[in-house]
Image (cartoon, rainbow, N blue to C red):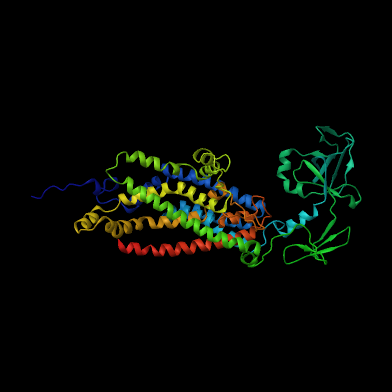
Amino acid sequence: MSAPQTTTDAEVGPLGTDGPPPRRTRGLRAADASHARDYSPGFFVKLALMAVVDALGVYVVWSAWTEGSYGILAASLAMLVAANWVYFSKRALPLKYILPGLLFLLVYQIFVVGYTGYVAFTNYGTGHNATKEQAVSALLIQNERRVAALTVVEDGDALGFAVVTEDGEVEAGTADRPLATVDGATVEDGRATDVPGFTVLPRDQVLQRQAEVTELRVPVSDDPEDGSIRTTDARTGYVYTSALEWDAAADTMTDTTTGTVYTPNDEGQFEAPDGSTLAVGWRVPVGVDNFVTAFSDARYAQPFVKILVWTFVFAIGSVVTTFLLGLFLAIVFNDTRMRGRKVYRTLMILPYAIPGFLAALLWSGLLNTRFGFVNEVILGGAHIPWLTDPWLAKLSVLGVNLWLGFPYMFLICTGALQSLPGDVTEAAKIDGAGRWRMWRSITLPLLLIATAPLLISSFAFNFNNFTLIYMLTGGGPRFADASVPLGHTDILISMVYSISGVDGSAQKDFGLASALSIVIFVIVGTISAIAFRSTRKFEEIS
């Protein structure tokens, strides 16, 4: 007699039929599960975050469009599309983790280096800050005089200006109608508020039509030589009476008072037949002229060599001194026989907790020749020129950087020493190795495996340690024989800052400064590559 057959739930199909459920039913269940996963709380969080990113991206794209920066517009649009595709696609899971880093690398590293390289081959600087179109516009509006407060008005579809004269009368006009007195106009706080025959535009409409307003020119009278009214802020008017006339077809600028014709030259300026040039120029490519100037012009070449040598001395000296002191303290406080090691270690890292720029300013006051704490209190009223003597200033820079940098080396050396394998040390003791032999053959090589990359990065940091130099000495004391504002404690990066003219100490020369920045980049990159390659020797030891 056979056993009764039982039917499990899994074998019962729809409507009580035997067998597994049809494929369509299983597909619907899978779709329902997938649908539930898609609309989980995490999905809505992702949707909200991407909405914020898209809003910022659209703002950047729109700003680039209005400013005419089509390169930034294209790059921003591409990054925005890439971000949406990556985070809403199921096939780009790895990119979800690396895309933010790639975008930051593109914006803050690749773009910066690329743009610096571009500027290095141009004459970008004082007198050459803009494009040729902007230079022409600037030359044409140089001779202007300010008039009374201005009001933007509208006559039908034509924009116009209404100004209050010195007699208190209101004059209004458009690009096709010169200014004319308007009877019955209302003036409040020196500004026309109601102009019969014209519509006074409210502020929000003025902002919406800002481009039209700033490009508008309203003739002062029927005589073109009387000039025209223009504005840059829609509130203050200027009489435009330029003595220069621009001929776009001939690409010339003519002085209407003398008849002198200026033509563009290869240096981005309008030049007359006698060699004189107009004040405002524009950016043009200059090839390798900036690099040639940096290494051949006596104004820069002589201080450049001195500053380059000092930069290497400062960077290498800072790494060596901070590492040796940090290592010494790490060895001392790593001894288990010392009591209160936690307290001492906390005190050792206090300089590291103070912001670098603040510490440099603090030491600048402490080392002041006449009023500094070091001279007045510690040295009993001595007048030692710590920051004004060339050699003492360099020693002071190294000393302050030692105070700032040894806690970092102390921390990494402490961590490296505590991570050394104890069995290797014990085996060396059993073999009869002494302390010096163990230190030279085991501890130091293993220590360098962990710290060598950090020493290289410390060298690169100190090679460009602008903050310490700028805040402590300002690059001084100045070279006595230099015609540019450079000094004995300047390093290459502070030299670039001084030459750029950002601080107002000299004319701006961003092209030359960018060329020097490329030189610094090449030097640091080359040394770092060689040093990182050399660290492989330490890996062989392990």
- In the foreground, 507 or 148: 507
Rendering quarter of residue 516: bottom right
- Quadrant of the image containing the C terminus: bottom left
Q: Is residue 290 above or below residue 103?
A: below
- In the foreground, 531 or 312: 312
Which residue in the rendered view is the most extreme toward the left? 1
- In the foreground, 442 or 161: 442
Which residue in the rendered view is the most extreme toward the right? 223
Residue 29 can be seen, yes or no? no
- In the foreground, 120 or 205: 120
Residue 235 can be seen, yes or no? yes
User: Residue 481 in the image: x percent, y percent?
Assistant: 65, 58
User: Residue 385 in the image: x percent, y percent?
Assistant: 57, 47
Q: Is residue 444 left or right of residue 43?
A: left
Q: Is residue 340 left or right of residue 355?
A: left
Please give the name of the residue rendered at 84% of the width and 64% of the height, measured from the top-left corner. Answer: 261
Please give the name of the residue rendered at 82% of the width and 34% of the height, measured from the top-left corner. Answer: 190
User: Residue 52 in the image: x percent, y percent?
Assistant: 53, 44
User: Residue 534 in the image: x percent, y percent?
Assistant: 39, 64
